[in-house]
Image (tube, rainbow, N blue to C red):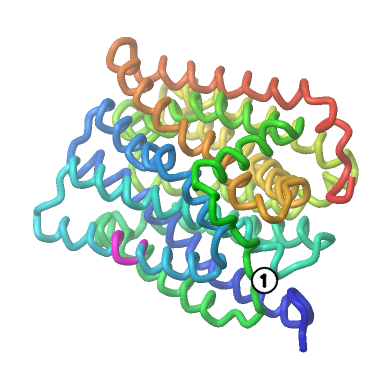
Amino acid sequence: METFGARNGNRDFRRLWVGQAVSQLGSSISMVGLQFIAVVTLNATPREMGLLAAAGGITILTVGMFAGALADRIRRRPILIAVDLARAVVLATIPVMAWLGRLTMNRLYVFAALTGALTVLFDSAYRAYLPTLVTEDELMSSNSKLALSQSASEVGGPGLAGVLIQLFGAPVAILLDSVSFLWSAAWLAAIRTREPAPKAVAEDSHVFGEIADGLAAAWEQPILRALTLRNATGAFFLGFIGGMYFVFVVRELGLSAGLVGTIISFGGAFSLAGSAAAQRLAARFGLGRAMIGAALATGLGSLLPGLAHGPVWVCVAFLAASQMFDIGWSVYGIGEATLIQSIAPPHLLGRVSAAVSLLFRGVIPIGSVVAGLLAERISLRGAMLVGGAGYLLSAGWLVRCRELRQWRHASS
């Protein structure tokens, strides 16, 4: 009989990879589609764009740690399949309501909140599920492959989204994302590697106590603590940029949907390069130092959009230069996932993953709301620059962590 993660594991990892590759392409298309529905179709104000960005993150703050506890209580693959099916239904509802003329900003907030809750549940189980399919020595390469497909989706997705929006409208772009989740669910259902039963939960155990165990594990370990603190502070300021980016480039810089999609795709190409180079950079400089360098690079890139000004070609140059720093996003993301999977105890992996990511995804909406209010008081450009500067400074938590600077590879 095959043991967990044995010969069948590599084949099953490919099934996971194929499913996620298409799903991520759909999500990158949908991301652009939602923003353009809000800005162009519903004429959203900066404050409303901030609230839209916040809607998905608020649910992350409320359900994030419960999602991590659930991922440690039951087998993770059924969670992944159920969430993909639920996301397909939620996203399919958006274009239907748009075509019926019944889509409003308030309803868009609800859809964003539902999608955010489902996404955090998926991600908590997803990171914890990967070690079931691969060995510890394969974690870095497996995370790199998954990041590679995500980066590839960022190359083709936004540009394809811009074309689809201009030809058929934003609802069509979102409908494609709904179909992509059905594809992902089908490939997950095809996985044959037996997932080990989760560690038995004591009868007197309470979910809040389990959540506390995950938070404590993330806080007590120096590297995980540095990642958590960086995520919390960096996400707040990243919310400024994420919440205001589309309304800034469309209204203040006057760029079209197709051009914006092409610019974002340009960043996807560099993200793709980062995914391909992550292992080599970690081997050359050490995983910890590679992550610190990547964090500083993305911080520098976050300053450039707010500096864009003048003719369209100058604005495009600033935005494209910013996208070049996306090479750091892949390096950092691969390193973070590998560190968590290597350091966290297996029975706490879902909760630790949720704790670290919670203070990234969950704090972004707070920054987005503040950015919307600040933009209406000073300017969109001012809010973008504040966000870029704050995000760059958040890398200081990583620089200060001696254990991270010395971490070489997964078995360090």
Chief secondary structure of the magenta portion: helix
**Front residue of this view, candidates 300 and 122:** 122
Q: Position of residue 339 (x, y in %)?
A: 75, 45
The relative height of residue 360 versus residue 148 in the rendered view (above or below) is above
Q: Quadrant of residue 18?
A: bottom right
Q: Is 393 placed left or right of 93 in the picture?
A: right
Q: Callout 1: helix, strand or loop?
A: loop
Q: Position of residue 205 (x, y in %)?
A: 55, 50
**Front residue of this view, candidates 150 and 314:** 150
Q: Position of residue 326 (x, y in %)?
A: 62, 40
Which quarter shows the N terminus? bottom right
Is any atom of residue 152 visible in this view? no
Q: Which residue range is magenta in the image?
A: 87-91
Q: Quadrant of residue 369?
A: top left
**Front residue of this view, candidates 280 and 262:** 280
Q: Can you name the residue that lies furthest to the left here?
A: 101
Q: Which residue is mark 1?
A: 196
Which quarter shows the C terminus? top right
Q: Is residue 20 magenta?
A: no
Residue drawn at the location 25% of the way across and 58% of the way down: 171
Residue drawn at the location 73% of the way across and 50% of the way down: 345
Circle 1 Cα neighbour tier, 10 Å, few/some/many (<14 / 14–19 / ≥20): few
